[in-house]
Image (cartoon, helix red, strand yellow):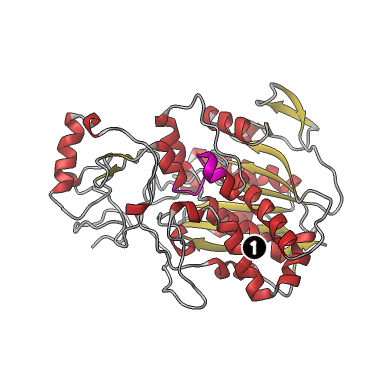
Amino acid sequence: MCAACCFDHTCRHFYPKTTVPAASDQHPAGFKTLREAFRWPDVFLQKVAKHYGTPWLCKRLRLWRWTFSSAFSGVGAPESAVTSLEAAAGIFLESAGARKPVHRKVLFEFTCEIDPHCRKVLMNTYQSPCNWPDITSFNPARKTQYCSTHQKMCPVQKYHVRNRLRVNAAGPICTLFSRMGRRTGTDDPRFVTHSSYYDSMKQISDIMIIENVPEYSEEIARQHLVGWSTESVVVDPRVLGVPASRARLYILAFNEATVKRRRDVCFGCTALCCNKHLMTTKSHWSGVGFKSNQVFQVVARNLADYRRLKTVRFPDMSQYPRNGRGRGECADKTLCTLTTSTKLFSEDKKRFVSSKELLSSHILPTTLDQSRICSAPALCLDGVSTGQQSKMAGNSMNSVCVGMVLLAACLSLEPK
């Protein structure tokens, strides 16, 4: 039985997963609905407060001061996560009776994204931040760079504020290392984007959060970040209560010259956020997709092959079971790992899963209701085709996983 799906065939690839914990006092039951999953920042803060105490958490949140940037972020999962966390922190402080700080906790500085469709989403969703389109030509030593958002030369660093940590979150190209990709590693010509990222961002960042496939090596970060401390964790959204498989390595790196680790809390506090998942793929979708009569002849033949297996409720129509390459939901009835070519068909609703639903599986808000719940702006997808949206979903980080690592960085690191 394949660990990634429910097909009894010889696996050609290994899909790394983290262990989903059983429900207990340490790992309580997770979200029951997709709508409830958008409340993850409140849930995470409540769990930390229960473990460390409300006064301790209030003190840490009051001292939170970041300037935030991203690279390779796609549609902006890091931006969405940090925005949700900032709003939840304000609500938590108010409910605890603590005095809210007058300063803003997070100041957005820039993005670094080459894909024009992702740039459009970032520009229209997150207050038009500056974007440097090519990481390989980005030179932080210059005071100004060409900004694709404003179509002019813009300052590289907008904010020069004391006692603010400069944080960058990034998800460099993963197909170089993925078992599903080319597996060419550091020999691939595109690895220059990784080297350029480390070489440039370490000059203007105090903390770097790197997301990649589990096959990625933390040693790569260590070699490029001399004088920095690094630690890592592999996280699957399912351990956080989200029914979507996407195991990823998250590296937390910080400059030892400007940042120190607190003694009373460590990166391991991320384990406090773990849940036993409850929500399944059957109750996950609520949007509008293609009508059943839009299943064309070539797709119908592939669907018939899947139906012979009888157990698959969400077949991936971009793969072919007759060739031993079929994919469906995981054995625990959660969503399979999305790729840029994934085309899921819902047997229960007799239609394709829409591109917005694929994005929402990463707990990225695509509706006003979801935006209101998580206090992050809904993705502005105007002018972006559904095909490009699906590709974005295949490339995207999971907002809850990124948020967990951002919260751990906020609580465990502080300026020297």
Q: Residue 96 in the image: x percent, y percent?
A: 73, 66
Residue with the most extreme bottom position: 25
Q: Is residue 41 magenta?
A: no
In the picture, which quadrant includes the N terminus? bottom left
**How many marks on residues?**
1
Q: Which residue is mark 1?
A: 408
Amino acid type at circle 1 is Ala
Q: Residue 91 in the image: x percent, y percent?
A: 69, 56
Q: Local crowd at mark 1 within 10 Å, few (<14), some, or many (≥20)?
A: many
Q: Residue 181 in the image: x percent, y percent?
A: 39, 45
In this orientation, which residue lies closer to the viewer: 129 or 115? 129
Q: Residue at 76% of width from left, 28% of height from top?
A: 154
Q: Main secondary structure of the magenta part?
A: loop
In the picture, which quadrant includes the C terminus? bottom right
What residue range appears in magenta?
Answer: 361-371
The part of the image, by quadrant, that contains residue 140 is top right
